[in-house]
Image (cartoon, grey):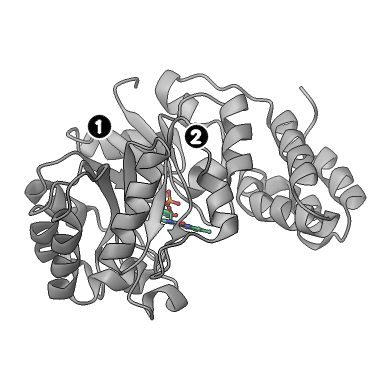
Amino acid sequence: MDRIKIYFAPMEGITTKTYRRVHRQFYPGVDRYYSPFIVVTSDHSFKRRDKRGILPYEEGLVPQLLTNDPEAFVWGAKKLADSGYEEVNLNAGCPVGTVVAKGKGAGLLENPDAFDAFLDSIFSNDDLPKISIKTRVGFYESSEAKRLAKILSRYPFCEVTVHPRAREDYYNGTPDKEAFDVMAEIIKVPICYNGDLCSVGDVNKLLSERNAIDRIMLGRGLIADPDLAGEIKTGERTGRLYEYLSCLRKEYKEELSGDRDVLFKLKEIWSYVGRGFPDHEKSLKTIRRCSNLTEYDIAVREILTPS
Ligand SMILES: Cc1cc2nc3c(=O)[nH]c(=O)nc-3n(C[C@H](O)[C@H](O)[C@H](O)COP(=O)(O)O)c2cc1C
């Protein structure tokens, strides 16, 4: 299935620069990685930690910005363009309460007129890099999809990624693929499908039902199975999960200050990877509960063997 473009979804706290580097080193198949959201403050700056995640320029990365201030967005997008990025993504999908309460992320979708004005203000600027957006199908419910798509279609986005859930759904229930279709019908720029694609079977089913789709974004499914993008494209798996996770462990140890933080990161990744090992509940429980890397290593070796 080589015709399909595959993007690695932005996942705050997970798809960091280190994670992306190690994933790229081990597994093929991802055409582009998206950075977790970078906050742009109204006084026009990036937080130091966020900045380290996207600068200097990283080949194959689309940085994502989170703000509800059009001037701050334009400032951030131009700053990133100056650093070499051709495309910048706008986060209009994050459902987290503290983000939405500030009118950011999926909070942008609560008031469609204000959202329209926000986009109008951004696109009235010259010399912007290409702008893409990652969004949902509505704030309260997916019946908002049509109105939202009409707003989006008024602006020259280079691409629109749609996660077909409303903000109120968070990540619960099943994606509303009909609402995705409604948006795909109206939006004339390339549209990317994102949501609950966790296996080759899921992707085959989506593409057989909707053969106009030529790009997909994978999040949790690709964290759980880092081989998935390559397998979707070529039918072949690279394997080497043990080596991959060992490399992440090594890199996190170099990057982070202390085993507690390293363990926290590895446990988060295992909360996804572990789904592929339902017969190892005892060892997975040890990974969830362990308090040092020695216990962690023993539990991992009970599940995986070096190739
Ligand atoms: C832990 C976590 C962090 C996320 N961080 C971001 C983010 O920074 N920016 C964003 O646009 N979406 C973020 N998302 C949403 C994902 O990019 C994606 O849209 C969502 O997980 C649905 O796709 P999936 O079913 O393939 O995982 C996050 C999701 C999770 C679970």
Amino acid tagged 2:
Glu
Instruction: Name above or below for residue 70 compared with residue 63.
Output: below
Q: Is residue 15 visible?
A: no
Q: Residue 6: x, y in percent?
A: 38, 33
Instruction: Name above or below for residue 125 compared with residue 142.
Output: above
Residue ID for mark 1: 214
User: Left or right: 130 with respect to 243?
Assistant: left
Quarter of the image for residue 232 reads: top left
Q: Quadrant of the N terminus?
A: top left
Which sits in the foreground, 175 or 244? Answer: 244
Residue visible at 33% across and 56% down in the picture: 75
User: Left or right: 139 with respect to 40?
Assistant: left
Q: Residue 273: x, y in percent?
A: 63, 45
Q: Sequence-wise, which precedes: disc 1 or disc 2?
A: 2
User: Left or right: 64 with respect to 11?
Assistant: left
On residue 50, the disc is none
Where disc 2 sits, the SS reads: loop
Residue ID for mark 2: 58
User: Left or right: 10 with respect to 136?
Assistant: right
Where disc 1 sits, the SS reads: loop
Which sits in the foreground, 14 or 197? Answer: 14
Residue visible at 74% across and 34% down in the picture: 247
Ligand 1 location (quadrant): bottom left
Amino acid tagged 1:
Asp
Q: CA distance from mark 1 to mark 2?
A: 24 Å
Q: Residue 301: x, y in percent?
A: 84, 38
Residue visible at 76% across and 22% down in the picture: 307
Residue visible at 33% across and 50% down in the picture: 77
Instruction: Name above or below for residue 255 compared with residue 168.
Output: above
In the image, farthest residue toward the right: 294
